[in-house]
Every structure is written in structure tokens, then in C-alpha cells.
Amino acid sequence: MLEIKGVTAGYGRTKVLHDVTVEIPTGRAVSVMGHNGAGKTSLLRVATGLIPVMSGQVLLDGEDVTRMPPSKRVQRGLGYVPQGQQSFPQMTTLENLQLVAKRQSDIDEVFDLFPVLKELLSRRAGLLSGGQRQQLAIARALITEPKLLILDEPTEGIQPTIVAEIEHTIMQLARDGLSVLLVEQHIGFALEAADKYLVLASGFASRTGEGGAFAAEGVRAAMTI
């Protein structure tokens, strides 16, 4: 599905990622963990084409997309939910969804995952809670029917009750065969949701392995280095 191979990338002349390799196979979930500043968001931006690659390759379904702009990658099946519960605050929930929907049935389908949104269709997105805005952001990405859903800290700054709902939805999507690339600080959730994981430290891949609860001790050890 998506391969990031030996990538070094950053901003201007500043390198943030150093020779990082990670593969997200079709129908699998991969979690990326690490402390703040480790390069997690930069890795997602490499995947989506938002920052240039200094060296290495990005492959999508075997095609070299290293120099391909973000819009073209979206057309080829990438869905990206950045940090910060992003929405168009002056638009209603329904209008936010209609921006990316081709037909009403696309919107109806996301209500199965996020039923609360159906009750908030006429409310401006800027008046939603942080958790509701995050649900809206994920729903908007899913409406585009991505092959790979990329999520950057989807539970950050959200009330615990909605965190549980979002975690459940992401794990359900992964179990249903959607490819997922997840950056997440909560180690337990990150490992439970993932088939494989990658730990970044100062822009280097410090540990990789299989997901699951038994990996938690090794991940915590890698994050103390």
C-alpha cells in the first residue's frame, strides 16, 4: 500500500527525519510513537507530500509518488486527518461534510460510525466540542473513501468519553480492512489498534515490531532512550 523507504526530510536545510523506513501494507494498521519533536508529524507530512524528501522514496501501491503533490496523492487514495480537530468553523456540520461528499449516501454512511453528528448537522462546527470536531474531521476524511487513512494524534486534547468512542471507531476501521497510519501518544491504544509499530527518537527509527499489548514494555523502553 504505502512504503516510505530510507527517507531523510525536513524543513529548509534542517533535517528532521533521518533514513526512516516504514511500510503500511494493504488492510493493515501501523502506529508511530515517540516523544514530542521526534519527527512523527513530519513523517505523516512526507507520506502526504506536504514536505519535500531530501533522499529516499515514497511509494503508493508500487508507484513512486515522492515528487507527487498532495492533491494527486489524495486522488490515489490517501485520507489525512491532521492534529487539532480541524474544521471550517463558520460552516455547519452538514456543510463541512458536503464539501467532500459526492452524494447523500456518502454522508449517511458516516453516521453509522459517528451517530452524534446526525444530531449536530445544523450546528456550526466552531460551536462543537473538541471531540465532536475530531469526529467530524475523521468523518470528512472517510467520506472520500480512502485506501489509507492517516491520523495525527486523533485523541489529543479530547474528553475521555469521546476518546473511547474515537478509539473504538479507529480499531473497527482497522479490523474491517482499512489501511491506517496512526500517530498516537497513548501507547496502549496505539499498540492495540496496530498490527505493527514504529518508535521515532530524534528523527531516527529506534524500534519497530508487532503490535499488541505485549509490545508495550519494549516501546516504553525505546521511548526512554
Image: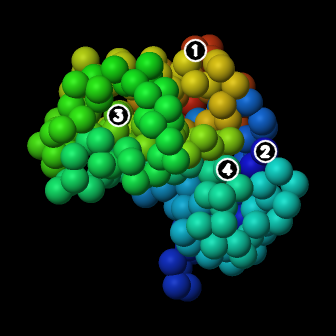
Name the front one of labels 3 and 2: 3
Question: Which class describes the residues within 10 Å of circle 4: few (<14), some (14-19), or many (20+)?
Answer: some
Amino acid identity at mark 2: Met
Residue at the spot x=85%, y=60% of the render?
A: 63
SS type, badge 1: helix
Amino acid identity at mark 3: Gln
Amino acid identity at mark 1: Ala
Residue 187 or 136: which is nearer the viewer?
Answer: 136
Residue 91 in the image: above or below residue 17: above
Name the front one of labels 1 and 4: 4
Question: Which class describes the residues within 10 Å of circle 2: few (<14), some (14-19), or many (20+)?
Answer: some
Residue 95 coordinates in the image, percent (x, y): 30, 48
Check disc 1 and report the residue beneath it: 213
Question: Gap in Å between the C-alphas at discs 3 and 2?
Answer: 25 Å
Residue 126 coordinates in the image, percent (x, y): 16, 49
Lower sequence index among marks 1 and 3:
3
Left or right side of 144 for 140? left
SS type, badge 2: loop
Name the front one of labels 1 and 3: 3
SS type, badge 4: loop
Question: Gap in Å between the C-alphas at discs 1 and 2?
Answer: 25 Å
